[in-house]
């Protein structure tokens, strides 16, 4: 098979289908989503068999346990996939929404209309559930999709794709509105990200290496999420009742998520007061603290197991540990905290703990990250917690979509003009 | 001079300055803009002298008349530049605006805050007024700017840059918030578009060739405006009183602008009725009509000078003439019009003339262009006419900014969370 021709054929089909799904009614899109969910439930046995085939091949190829785990589709996972499709059907349709209409002195009325982006290419690792999730979000937002999942999940992805197509067909929508790339050849990715005539945006979901590679080579815009080096800053005017719960939750509620805190900053004036309690709370979860020379003795003096205390190196201020480790630094105050964050953060999510109104407002305004919070755990940076209903990813870019990307992030706005025969003088 | 090091030094300065202008008060930014305007008026003689030097060198180098014309700065041009700065000072400040705040079940309140993009690189041809315009829009939107104007305008740009710096200094803002590239070496452009660590977005202003080159080579997002092949579609239910004025205005009010109509589509059922009047009106302006085989005899029968009637070739449906020429095609109706536009348009601006509500709404929704209009001239697609106050360009992209880009297009939105000690369960 000639990969170039194959991918261009998919692209052409997707572009043609995108016109039809862009104009599709909310009803038709929802009917398709519900039919997909029904098909997934009805095809439960086939999906499990396809997954078993993928798993057998993956084990034979010696895939590591964590990846096997992600690849595994359980009975519960199938239910979750179907429910996810039903949830997206229940979300409001963003397409066609008219806002900001204003009458101009010329007599015309100018406004904006929300419209799909067109064709979205999604590149992801061997996680079968992403196939159904991504299909649902792209369709509901009126876009056509080309999905390229990890090669280890090929059989399961093909089985899910058949359910997706059945749903589209049931709603009389083009089956080419969602296409799953049917080859494991890596050249397919190279083609997908370099055909701007057919693909409007790429959403890579996966490790930092994959995303950097795609961003470097893509000839279309990429909605990308790199790392999450999230900070909690405990301000001089922090409420003692909020400090430990927020730091503890931000660090320890889950270790492997991108909105987990990886760095803790504490204002010098309150370091002596707060650091021992924070340190003991983190130590109770077995969290290793990599501390600056000011923080280290304060933590040592709090009776914390010495094996959990390490002197921080420069690299620690930039690290996304995704593990029970946190960098700890005492800073002179708000200005130093903002400067440190803007220099070291990956721009994902940062939180301040403070009762000082002006400090809170300055932190919100001056910290240059996708999500900035006052008196809340960084763990809230999430499409569901923000009320988006679902998310296709979290963007650490500044252009177009920032932070959790839901249906709206897969759309754009065009200008519309309601005239009555006006001409320009 | 080592261009790589020079541009990276500019980039570092811009990045540092961007933090300060992002946090600057509206007052400080407006004060700077007014001081720039005052400096430009006060330095009138110096600006004219610098321009005279550029003009002398350009003439000696044999630059063509149209480019000499663009390069020329007149007394009136200097006034217009100063007034432009004052107008931007009078615009509302988009930075820091908080919108869409909603309380979530967890107790947090989630909203969005409008924030600058950071550092904007502007690449433009030898038009001195762009230096002041671009500086003003970037500063007001809280961004730092690196400006790279056409080499023929170097002396004038340097003189304007001195006025911009004087204004920044008067308002106690960093003079490095707006930097003009001081070398005519073309390698500077290559560096500017490939340093994502320092530059967040590139806005090229110039010919299609320049913009395509920049888009291909850039390693940062580009807000680009390619060509404007704008359509007017005269629907079966068009109001006869609106047809000729809109087509005539869209084509003939100005020929060289990107929102000028280049293609006319007419529904077959009304072609016989409307084409003769349209043809005579266009002929009275000397507009050449490149017509499809159905339109041609109808125009011929209307007594139009045969020299203005040409049979259209396929290429005509895709052409941006920027001249008194229009492509004319009879289509079967609304569906065919939408299909033709979505296949042939550059995605800039399209208008329908109709009294049919459903046709109007379908056209608005299904035509995939940055501006879509009902019963109005395409010439309205413009930042001033839309009420943006000023525009840095018109985007034919779908991502981020679409259509006329004003202050808001130079900003982005981040998520903000107002909490009260909430943690995630």
Image: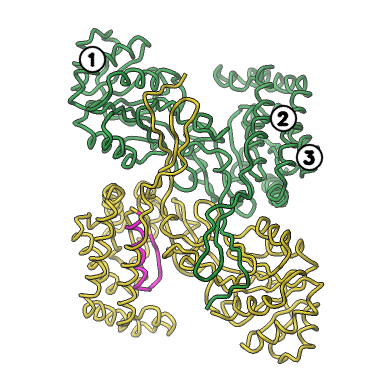
Chain colours: A green, B yellow
The numbered mark, 1 or 3, whose residue comes first in the sequence reads 3
| Distance Cα–Cα, label 2 vs label 1 | 52 Å
Chain containing the residue with disc 1:
A
Q: Could you tell me which residue is drawn at 68 percent across and 58 percent down?
A: B361
Residue A5 in view here:
no
From the viewer's perspective, is residue B190 above or below residue B197? below
Q: Could you tell me which residue is drawn at 70 percent across and 43 percent down?
A: A26
The numbered mark, 3 or 2, whose residue comes first in the sequence reads 2
Q: In front: mark 3 or mark 2? A: 3
> To which residue does mark 1 refer?
A299
Tell me the tag on residue A171.
3
The numbered mark, 2 or 1, whose residue comes first in the sequence reads 2
Q: Which residues are magenta?
A: B122-141
Residue B140 in magenta? Answer: yes
From the viewer's perspective, is residue B59 above or below residue A391? below
Instruction: Give the quadrant of the N terminus of chain A.
Output: top right
Q: Is residue A314 left or right of residue A74?
A: left
Point out residue B208 in the picture as x, y percentages from the top left corner. 52, 67
Point out residue A222 in the picture as x, y percentages from the top left corner. 52, 45
> To which residue does mark 2 refer?
A160
| Distance Cα–Cα, label 3 vs label 2 | 17 Å
Local crowd size for mark 1, using a 10 Å CA cut-off: few (<14), some (14–19), many (≥20): many
Q: Secondary structure at mark 2?
A: helix
Q: Is residue B8 left or right of residue A209?
A: left
Is mark 2 in CB contact (under 8 Å) with mark 1? no
Chain containing the residue with disc 3:
A
Tell me the tag on residue A152.
none
Is mark 1 in CB contact (under 8 Å) with mark 3? no
Q: Secondary structure at mark 3?
A: loop
Residues indicated by labels 3 and 2 sit on the same polypeptide chain: yes
Q: Could you tell me which residue is drawn at 77 percent across and 87 percent down?
A: B300
**Quarter of the image where one finds residue A406:** top right
């Amino acid at each position: 098979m000639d990969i170039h021709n194959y991918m261009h054929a998919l692209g052409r089909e997707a572009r043609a289908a995108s016109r039809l799904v862009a104009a599709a009614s909310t009803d038709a899109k929802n009917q398709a989503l519900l039919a997909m969910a029904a098909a997934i439930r009805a095809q439960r046995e086939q999906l499990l068999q396809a997954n078993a085939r993928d798993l057998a091949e993956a084990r034979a190829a010696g895939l590591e346990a964590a990846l096997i785990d992600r690849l595994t589709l359980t009975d519960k996972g199938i239910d979750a996939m179907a429910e996810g499709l039903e949830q997206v059907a229940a979300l409001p349709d963003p397409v066609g929404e008219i806002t900001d209409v204003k009458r101009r002195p010329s007599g015309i009325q100018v406004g904006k209309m929300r419209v799909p982006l067109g064709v979205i290419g999604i590149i992801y690792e061997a996680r079968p559930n992403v196939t159904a999730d991504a299909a649902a979000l792209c369709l509901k937002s009126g876009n056509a999709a080309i999905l390229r999942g990890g090669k280890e999940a090929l059989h399961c992805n093909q089985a899910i794709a058949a359910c997706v197509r059945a749903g589209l067909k049931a709603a009389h929508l083009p089956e080419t509105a969602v296409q799953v790339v049917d080859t494991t050849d890596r050249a397919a990715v190279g083609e997908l990200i370099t055909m701007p005539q057919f693909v409007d945006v790429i959403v890579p979901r996966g490790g930092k290496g994959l995303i950097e590679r795609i961003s470097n080579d893509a000839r279309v815009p990429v909605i990308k999420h790199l790392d999450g080096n999230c900070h909690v800053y405990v301000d001089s005017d922090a409420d003692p009742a909020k400090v430990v719960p927020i730091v503890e939750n931000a660090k320890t509620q889950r270790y492997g998520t991108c909105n987990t805190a990886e760095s803790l900053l504490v204002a010098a004036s309150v370091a002596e007061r707060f650091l021992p309690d924070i340190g003991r709370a983190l130590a109770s979860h077995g969290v290793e603290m990599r501390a600056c020379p000011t923080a280290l003795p304060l933590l040592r003096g709090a009776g914390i197991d010495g094996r959990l205390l390490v002197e921080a190196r420069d690299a620690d201020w930039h690290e996304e540990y995704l593990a029970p480790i946190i960098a700890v630094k005492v800073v002179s105050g708000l200005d130093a905290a903002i400067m440190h964050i803007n220099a070291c953060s990956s721009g994902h999510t940062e939180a301040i703990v403070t009762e000082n109104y002006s400090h809170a407002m300055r932190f919100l305004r001056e910290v240059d990250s996708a999500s900035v919070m006052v008196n809340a755990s960084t763990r809230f940076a999430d499409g569901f917690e923000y009320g988006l209903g679902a998310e296709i990813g979290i963007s650490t870019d500044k252009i177009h979509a920032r932070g959790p990307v839901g249906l709206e992030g897969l759309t754009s706005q065009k200008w519309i003009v309601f005239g009555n025969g006006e001409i320009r003088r």
